Amino acid sequence: MMRFICLALGLLAGIAYSDTLNYAIPSRLEVLDDCEYPASYEIANFTRYTDDVDGSQNSTSFHFLDSKTEIDTCCQQNSTSKNSIEGTNRWPCDNPDVEFIYQTTNIVGLTVIEKVCPETGSSFEASGSSNPVLNCAVSGSGTRCIAQQSLIQGNFSSLEPIPPSS
Ligand SMILES: *[C@@H]1O[C@H](CO)[C@@H](O)[C@H](O)[C@H]1NC(C)=O
Ligand SMILES: *[C@@H]1O[C@H](CO)[C@@H](O)[C@H](O)[C@H]1NC(C)=O
Ligand SMILES: *[C@@H]1O[C@H](CO)[C@@H](O)[C@H](O)[C@H]1NC(C)=O
Ligand SMILES: *[C@@H]1O[C@H](CO)[C@@H](O)[C@H](O)[C@H]1NC(C)=O
């Protein structure tokens, strides 16, 4: 398995981001007036490797930044990763306040999920999706795909209660 090198810390800083919320805040969340709601995010270096012979080599990795809430973290999934919520296909990033789902069937693409103001004990999360266009090349017994856009900008488009862990 090729190790994913992720240097966090402001590598993407300085890029313009949108402050506009693309979702409605439910009135029962009024208590969170001081909260910095997730609005937009950037994804860098989205990479996916799938192996036709040894599926344990499969991996997905990328770099996530939300400059408004100041979360700069690396996200990856491989054979040793544990779902953040059992029985789902949600995977935690290094910062567990961010999770992701990557699917090539059903809702195709990359969904990122960020806890809303976790320091307030809020039980809500914001999510947003994008569908990276991949450039793929055969590599060993598998295929390595890298997003055509080195930087993908996305908006959070929904705010929902965090699903219960079963
Ligand atoms: C993306 O990958 C390149 C090459 O591995 C690396 O130089 C760069 O720092 C990475 N960028 C981020 C934001 O992780
Ligand atoms: C790994 O990827 C291959 C190719 O897409 C797929 O056929 C296989 O089911 C995957 N294995 C695992 C364990 O995810
Ligand atoms: C596999 O993913 C986990 C995160 O789920 C990460 O901590 C670990 O370093 C990864 N392993 C390799 C070999 O990249
Ligand atoms: C994000 O939302 C802003 C404001 O609504 C909009 O101008 C921008 O085009 C959106 N960006 C993407 C990548 O959808």
Image (tube, grey):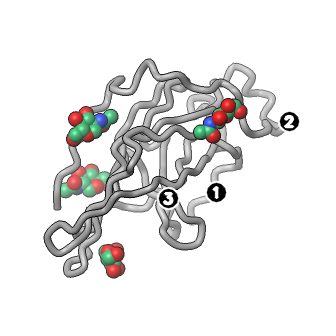
The answer to which of 149 and 24 lies nearer the viewer is 149
Quadrant where the image shows the N terminus: bottom left
Residue shown at 37%/41% (left/top)? 150
Q: Secondary structure at mark 2?
A: helix
Is residue 6 among the parts visible in the rendering?
A: no
Mark nearer the viewer, 3 or 2: 3
Residue carrying label 2: 27
Q: Callout 1: few (<14), some (14-19), or many (20+) C-alpha neighbours within 10 Å? A: few
Distance in Å between CA atoms under marks 3 and 1:
14 Å
Instruction: Estimate the x, y position of residue 160 in percent, counting from the top left.
Output: 71, 48
Q: Earlier in the sequence, mark 3 or mark 2?
A: 2
Instruction: Estimate the x, y position of residue 92 in percent, counting from the top left.
Output: 42, 51
Mark nearer the viewer, 3 or 1: 3
Is the residue at mark 2 in contact range of ligand 4, meaning its CB lies under 8 Å from it?
A: no
Distance in Å between CA atoms under marks 1 and 2:
19 Å
- Residue contact between numbered discs 3 and 1, judged by CB atoms under 8 Å: no
- Residue contact between numbered discs 3 and 2, judged by CB atoms under 8 Å: no
Direction right: furthest residue:
27
Is the residue at mark 1 in contact range of ligand 3, meaning its CB lies under 8 Å from it?
A: no
Residue shown at 37%/61% (left/top)? 82
Q: Callout 3: few (<14), some (14-19), or many (20+) C-alpha neighbours within 10 Å? A: some
Direction bottom: furthest residue:
53
Residue carrying label 3: 101
The three-letter code of the residue at mark 1 reads Pro
Residue shown at 38%/51% (left/top)? 147
